Amino acid sequence: METIEKLLKKPLWYNVLIGIVAFLIVFLLFFFSLGLITGNGKTEKVPTVVGLDINTAEQNLKALGFDVVLQDSIYVDTLPKNTILRQNPEADEIVRKGRTIYLTINRVLAPQVEMPNLVGFSLQSAQMYLKALGLRVGNITLVPDKNSNVVLDQLLNGVPIAAGSKISSGSGINLLVGDGSLSEMIEVPDLVGLTVEMARAKILAAGFIVGGFTSSASIQDTAAAFVIGQDPGIQSMILDSTGQPKPKRMLRGSTINLSIDLSPPLIIQPDSINNN
């Protein structure tokens, strides 16, 4: 009480000065102790952890006094699983000791994506679409079709895959693409009397597709059987100037069906008819 009374007896400017000095002392004490409280003034260079597995990266960062937070995970099929893909702050940045380092890792399991319908797309558009979905373009096979560079079918592991199917990101999609040659008309080859194996080779060499087989008997080895008929045949309904049927012509890529038997057909030569 006596001290307060003494202060009250002092001039006003004296008391104000004492108050200001006391405030400055408290402020300076707080300011200089702030660094000790928060760790300010201690810095550390951020190490490179991109490419390391998550356990090693965490150990390296925590050993330097950093906190670690897994911020995100994405999937890259060409890189090892659980490896660091990105870090923030980046390597070699000088930051406050104890700073939080945010990491992005490579996922263990590939995310599932929905297979689009690429049939009818141009090859370039299909490739861009697959890339945008995180899918890879596999083998591109040209097949006979009047449309050039147009996707005719989409396959996964050699099997057609329907639009809407769930598949793993990074899967390779094989594409069947038209070569623009289907508009070409080709003469139908004569296959009657050949073995099925020979007929098949002749059909494919001409640019046609082998269709179905029909037989009146049970045949174990179709390759060794003989062709006794074909559909379509080798003659058209159009007659030439001599009144004879013109050769049958079809679009490249058309199907030829075969009638087969264990025995070769009896082929009557025109000369033998004339002699009779």
Image (spheres, helix red, strand yellow):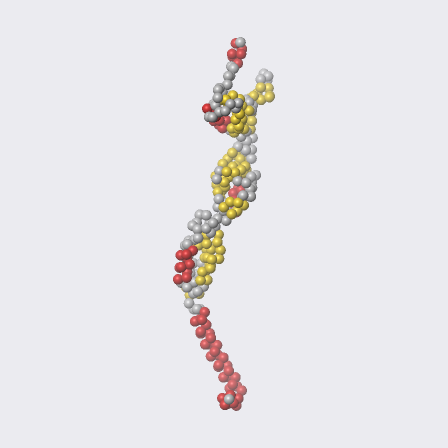
Residue closest to the far top: 276
Q: Vertically, is 37 above or below 204?
A: below
Q: Vertically, is 178 above or below 166?
A: above
Q: Vertically, is 205 above or below 21?
A: above
Residue 262 at what x, y percent from top left? 48, 21
Residue at image x 43%, y 53%? 83
Residue 159 at what x, y percent from top left? 50, 38
Visible in this render: residue 191?
Answer: no
Visible in this render: residue 176?
Answer: yes
Displayed quadrant of residue 99: bottom left
Residue at image x 51%, y 28%? 210
Residue at image x 48%, y 20%? 263
Total labels: the figure holds: 0
In the foreground, 50 or 260: 260
Displayed quadrant of residue 148: top right
Residue 192 at what x, y percent from top left? 51, 21
Q: Vertically, is 51 above or below 248?
A: below
In the foreground, 54 or 271: 54
Residue 91 at what x, y percent from top left? 43, 58
Residue closest to the far front: 218
Residue at image x 50%, y 40%? 156
